[in-house]
Amino acid sequence: MIGGPAGGSDNQTSSEMKTDQERVIKNIVRFRLTGTPDGNLLVTFFHLDVFNDMAVNRHIAGQFLGGLLGAGVLYEGNIQNNTHYPTAVTNLLLRVEVYVNCVRIEKAP
């Protein structure tokens, strides 16, 4: 079941935040996905201000090494490469009103 944006508000979008590698993550939009075989999930769409897949991979590797990607993260990367809950992610993406190029899918706390 697809829930509304996480936190119960109609639109939970952050304009930008800096990562430890000084790359900019913009247009953060979060949704809660309930009733999946993996339990409740937090699906976060964002625009990673990079120009190629290699840069996205470096960002993800940096998060992994920094301890930010734990066992609860099922996927983080380019939207088009996602294989976890692709139908749900596509349906949620239709509700996102800002430009995004990445998705993070993790088990909700």
Image: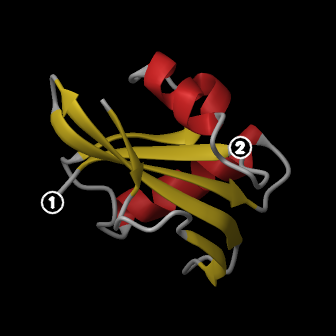
Q: How is the image coloured?
A: secondary structure
Q: Which residue sits at x=23%, y=55%?
A: 70
Secondary structure of the residue carrying tag 1 is loop
- Position of 65 with respect to 100 (left or right) is left
Report the amino acid beneath label 2. Answer: Met
Q: Which residue sits at x=23%, y=37%?
A: 34
In the displayed structure, 28 sits above or below 103; it is below
**Where does residue 36 sit, x and y in percent of width and height?**
21, 26
Relative depth, front residue between 54 and 70: 70
Relative depth, front residue between 15 and 69: 15
Using the numbered discs, state the Cα–Cα distance from disc 2 to disc 1 in whole angstroms.
30 Å
Residue 11, by quadrant, is: bottom right
Q: Which residue sits at x=42%, y=50%?
A: 4
The N terminus is located in which quarter?
Answer: top left
**Where does residue 47 sit, x and y in percent of width and height?**
71, 57
Report the amino acid beneath label 1. Answer: Pro
* Mark 1 lies on residue: 109
**Where does residue 7 sit, x and y in percent of width and height?**
34, 67
Q: Earlier in the sequence, mark 2 or mark 1?
A: 2
Q: Is residue 83 visible?
A: no
Relative depth, front residue between 65 and 106: 106
The C terminus is located in which quarter?
Answer: bottom left
Q: Label 2: few (<14), some or many (≥20) within 10 Å?
A: few
* Mark 2 lies on residue: 54
